[in-house]
Image (cartoon, helix red, strand yellow):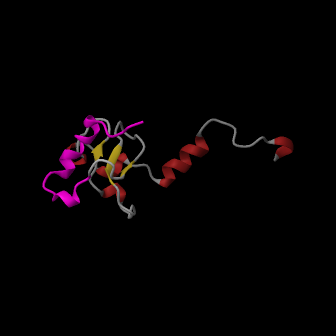
Amino acid sequence: MNNHKPSILNRFKKMNSNKPYEKQNKPFNFMLSGSEKNGIIPCLPFNKDISDIQLKPFIDYKSGIASDKLPLPTQAYWYTLDDVLTDYVRHNDHKFDYVNGV
């Protein structure tokens, strides 16, 4: 599947504006994306350091809207590890067989 459709690439124009060519996100560059939360899928250029990713500006993968134009602070669109683990534990499925109390 080709994720480099013009509609997707055009969303990066906002992120690339005011950046020199060598610093712009280009076709076939890597990008990071989060899981959908609050109706938004965060998407930003690849960076090895993700320690403060929830504070970095991003665009919504679906709409192309920049994070500074969204109604909530950027961290409201990222799941924490605590969110993921809590959801896993509370998900209504069988994690174990519970045979003989085990």
Residue lying at 87% horizontally and 43% vertically, measured from the top left: 100
Left or right for 90, reference 78: right
Range of the magenta residues? 1-25
Tell me residue 81's x, y (percent): 49, 54
Q: Is residue 12 magenta?
A: yes
Residue lying at 38% horizontally and 64% vertically, measured from the top left: 49
Give the camera-side residue of 54 and 7: 7
Position above or below: 96 against 47 = above
Tell me residue 4's x, y (percent): 32, 40
Position above or below: 1 against 16 = above
Position above or below: 26 against 48 = above
Quadrant of res 46:
bottom left
Give the camera-side residue of 22 and 42: 22
Give the camera-side residue of 72 and 68: 68
Tell me residue 1's x, y (percent): 42, 36
Left or right for 81, reference 11: right
Left or right for 91, reference 46: right
Q: Which residue reaches farthest left?
A: 18
Tell me residue 53's x, y (percent): 36, 57
Quadrant of res 36:
top left
How many numbered circles are shown? 0
Q: Is residue 45 magenta?
A: no
Residue lying at 78% horizontally and 40% vertically, measured from the top left: 97
